[in-house]
Amino acid sequence: MWTDSPLPLHEALSGIFGSVSLASWIFLLVPQLLENYREGSAEGISLAFLVVWFIGDLANFFGAVWAGLVPTVIALAVYFCFADAILITQCLYYNFVNEQKAARQAKLIGDGSGSNDPEQPLLRHNSDNIGLPGSRRRSSVSTKRRDSSLRSPLPSIPEVETSTRNWLKNFICIILVCLAGCLGWVVAWKLGAWKPTSAEDNANPHPAVGAEILGYLSAVAYLGARIPQIVKNHRERSCEGLSLLFFMLSLLGNATYGAGILFHSIDSRYVLTNLPWLIGSLGTMFEDTLIFIQFHMYAKKEEEDSSAIE
């Protein structure tokens, strides 16, 4: 047990990193929810990604309950599952609504198939993409970009300004989340709601086997969840419809979570006890980095395609 001695630096850093991680997770799904709402579509995000991630959060919740972790950890796990369910429900709703709209459009086009309108073949050609995930939306966006390039002599300037503004906005959001996490830790420490614990108290030499299995299951789910999204981005050569801030918060949350554990203690027993969560958090950082690379690659490709149209 800790006494009233001065707080060691590594414990303070562990608490701060943990608090920043908590703030990141709380706001994690909000950017993607807003992105889907603005687009009126959820075609940019892989539903398989969300479902596997939800499975990981469920395993994390049941593992936390089985292991008898502190109530705040269990409450956070419940919040994760609740937030996942909201995002999945939103995606299913938009997918259903947009499929119904596409079906009605296809029916209207089919009803006019006997018309002598010279524009009819063009309409039928455009309808070929109906039903392909993301194809209709991406085609319409490309058409808008092509039309705007024909109207404006310098179409790339607004796009560059918008991209820079988005990166700046995301960076400011990350700073605010970090400040919120730090402020939250200071308040909790001053009020006595947060107290450091020794590594011996946290390192259970005989953790429940079931809880440990669920911990590794959640780690595997977190690691595998992003694979469908990475494959989807690669197949469609686009990250359109994805919120960059969503993945930035994920990277921040995973990095600070792992740092919070390691700054607390690098005792072998303690590290082994937390190994499933370390694998799940630090391992997904690599996959998030791949998605960042895809954002950069495909944004650059879209700029080149826009320039070629000119």
Image (spheres, rainbow, N blue to C red):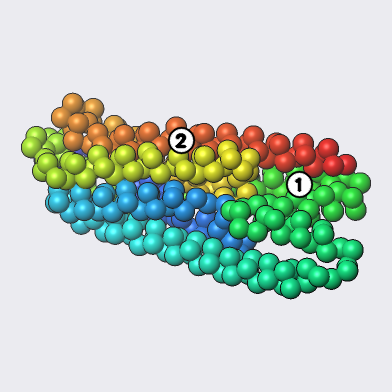
Q: Quick one: 35 or 220, which is closer to the camera?
A: 220
Q: Quick one: 87 or 49, which is closer to the camera?
A: 49
Left or right for 74, reference 256: left
Label 1–label 2 contact, CB within 8 A: no
Quarter of the image that includes the C terminus? top right
> Could you say which quadrant of the image residue 83 lies in?
bottom left
Select label 1 or label 2 by which is in front: 2
Question: Who's the residue at 33% across and 43% down the image?
Answer: 221
Secondary structure beneath dot 2 equals: helix
Please tell me how crowded label 2 is: few (under 14), some (14-19), or many (20+) other residues with Cα within 10 Å: many
What's the amino acid at mark 2?
Answer: Glu
- Residue 268 against residue 28 in the figure, above or below: above
Q: Quick one: 225 or 110, which is closer to the camera?
A: 110
Left or right for 219, reference 304: left
Question: Who's the residue at 89% across and 50% down the image?
Answer: 150
Furthest residue to the front?
Answer: 114
Point out residue 70 in the picture as x, y percentages from the top left corner.
19, 52
Secondary structure beneath dot 1 equals: helix
Mark 1 = which residue?
159
Quarter of the image that includes the N terminus? top left
Point out residue 262 in the picture as x, y percentages from the top left corner.
29, 32
Mark 2 = which residue?
287
Point out residue 28 in the picture as x, y percentages from the top left corner.
45, 52
